[in-house]
Image: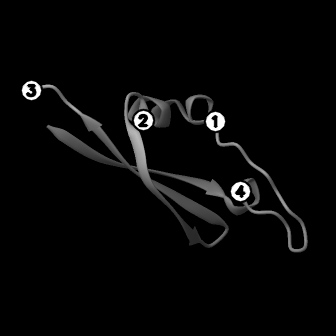
């Protein structure tokens, strides 16, 4: 049986986007970022993600799945 989950969290735009004319490389450390995020992603596989602008913030959404033995 496969189970699906959506996890979202919000970050300031400046944490993810480079200023105009510059490049930014970022590794998102899920396990060290927000404890609840790590708890919700542990053992789950990311199958899709989306970044949605929200004013001075961005909302990051992750669609996850896990296979359960029934």
Q: Which image quarter: residue 54?
A: bottom right
Q: Position of residue 17 (x, y in %)?
A: 75, 62
Q: Which image quarter: residue 48?
A: bottom left
Tell me the colour scheme of the image: one colour
The reply to whether the C-beta atoms of the residues labelled 2 and 4 are less than 8 Å apart is no
N-terminal of the two: label 2 or label 4?
Answer: 4
Q: What element carries label 4?
A: helix
The reply to whether the C-beta atoms of the residues labelled 1 and 4 are less than 8 Å apart is no
Q: Where is residue 34 in the image (x, y as percent from the top left)?
A: 56, 35
Indicate which disc residue 41 carries.
Answer: 2
Q: In this view, does 25 lie to the left or right of 29?
A: right
Please state which of residues 46 and 18 is positioned toward the viewer in this rendering: 46
Q: What element carries label 3?
A: loop
N-terminal of the two: label 1 or label 4?
Answer: 4
Which residue in the protein does label 1 denote?
29
The reply to whether the C-beta atoms of the residues labelled 1 and 2 are less than 8 Å apart is no
Q: Residues under labels 1 and 2: Cα distance?
A: 12 Å
Q: How crowded is mark 4: few (under 14 residues within 10 Å), some or many (20 or more)?
A: some
The reply to whether the C-beta atoms of the residues labelled 1 and 3 are less than 8 Å apart is no
Indicate which disc residue 70 carries.
Answer: 3
Which residue in the protein does label 4 denote?
16
Q: What element carries label 2?
A: helix
Q: Residues within 10 Å of mark 3 (few under 14, many from 20)?
A: few
Residue for point 29% across, 36% down = 66
Q: Residues under labels 2 and 4: Cα distance?
A: 20 Å
Q: Is mark 1 on a helix, strand or loop?
A: loop
Discs 2/3, front = 3
Q: Where is residue 30 in the image (x, y as percent from the top left)?
A: 57, 36
């Amino acid at each position: 049986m496969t189970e699906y989950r959506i996890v979202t969290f919000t970050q300031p735009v400046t944490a993810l986007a480079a200023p105009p004319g510059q490049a930014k490389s970022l590794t998102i450390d899920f396990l060290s970022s927000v404890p609840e995020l790590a708890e919700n992603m542990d053992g789950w596989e990311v199958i899709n993600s989306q970044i949605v602008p929200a004013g001075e913030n961005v909302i990051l959404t992750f669609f996850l799945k896990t296979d359960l033995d029934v």
